[in-house]
Amino acid sequence: MKETVTQPRTSSTPTTPVFCTIVPPHILGKLAEHEDPEHHEPARRTLEHDALHRTRRAGLAAQLLAPAADRADADKPNRTVYDAGHQQNLPGTKVHAESDGPSKDASVNRAHAGLGATFELYLKIYGRKSIDGAGLPLNATVHYGEKYDNAFWDGERMVFGDGDGQLFKDFTIPVDVIGHELTHGVTQYTANLDYQGQSGALNESISDVFGSLIKQYALGQSADQADWLIGADLLAAGVHGQALRSMKAPGTAYDDPKLGKDPQPATMAGYVRTADDNGGVHLNSGIPNHAFYLVASALGGKAWERAGQIWYDVLTGGHLAKNAQFADFAHLTVQAAQTRYGASGAEHEAVVKAWSTVGVTGT
């Protein structure tokens, strides 16, 4: 694949927050066609809601979301959790502040903990103070909508549905889902990748990468101990599947009569060309996802260290264009590995081999 030239993104580049959901439209679309109202009604409502929010978000003029002035206590999380009361009005009623003790509501506690786990990884491993780098307060809303089968980042906050109880459980349960969505915020404040085509798939993949790393860090797992699944605890009992996505083996996360079969490709040989889902951003993200898994598994140890550091260097380095293609990102990760670890290091070799294996670059 021919590489395109990327231009450094300057700090004056405006960012437009995108509406990013954890459950992709192709899963909800399959459910919306099911004959059982218990399955198709929540899915249809969720799809209608998500389409409306995407339209509203796309209609906003580009706005500069520059990091605020660095707070004196920016190295400490400032979390607030709201309760939507099964309505769709945001942010809802404030129910938990940073200084509060545990809530009687498990969803509130999980949201609070997940925001904290994300904050901790970015601060302790990469020296980043919250998602904007300057201590941005982290807000979340739980119990959003009626049987809402999704969670999303809307450019300002995390929002969690309770799920329908039949196919999806409470969306606050998987910490990697929280990390995934908040990482869309990190991307928003750094590379600001366009949410379309390959750049959109990179946007989704970066969120999967760091969502998985946040889970691994919280559990103290090495690369070989990790399951490399996104949303492993989200599917309800009886669903034939492990998770929403697999980074280790894209295309194998689920195979269920109601959800369908996981359609993610692992290599460019299976690249999906479609007008749906902003050009298949949740499908083709499997390719860079698998590349990261290959790098992390080749290097071993703690994936958030060397493999994660390379990906973070590229995301925040200022040279990743908004419309970057897979080959652009691959080229920058090869450069980043060489710059940080040397051209003869195992890190450089692992990155080069991974992108070749998934078919993004030549041998």
Image (spheres, helix red, strand yellow):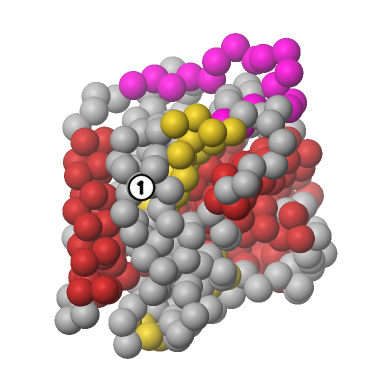
Residue 336 or 276: which is nearer the viewer? 276
- Pick the quarter of the image with the C terminus: bottom right
The three-letter amino acid code for the residue at tag 1 is His
Image spot of residue 37 (x, y percent): 20, 74
Q: Decide whether residue 74 is among the magenta residues.
A: yes
Under tag 1, what secondary structure? loop
Left or right of 86: which side holds 347?
A: right
* Picture layout, residue 130 above or below residue 11: below
Image spot of residue 299 (x, y percent): 77, 66
**Residue 204 quadrant:** bottom left
| Residue designated by label 1 | 86
Image spot of residue 158 (x, y percent): 47, 41
Left or right of 32: which side holds 76?
A: right
Label 1 Cα neighbours within 10 Å, binned few <14 / some 14-19 / many ≥20: some
Magenta stretch mostly in which secondary structure?
loop
Residue range highlighted in magenta: 63-80
Left or right of 146: which side holds 210?
A: right
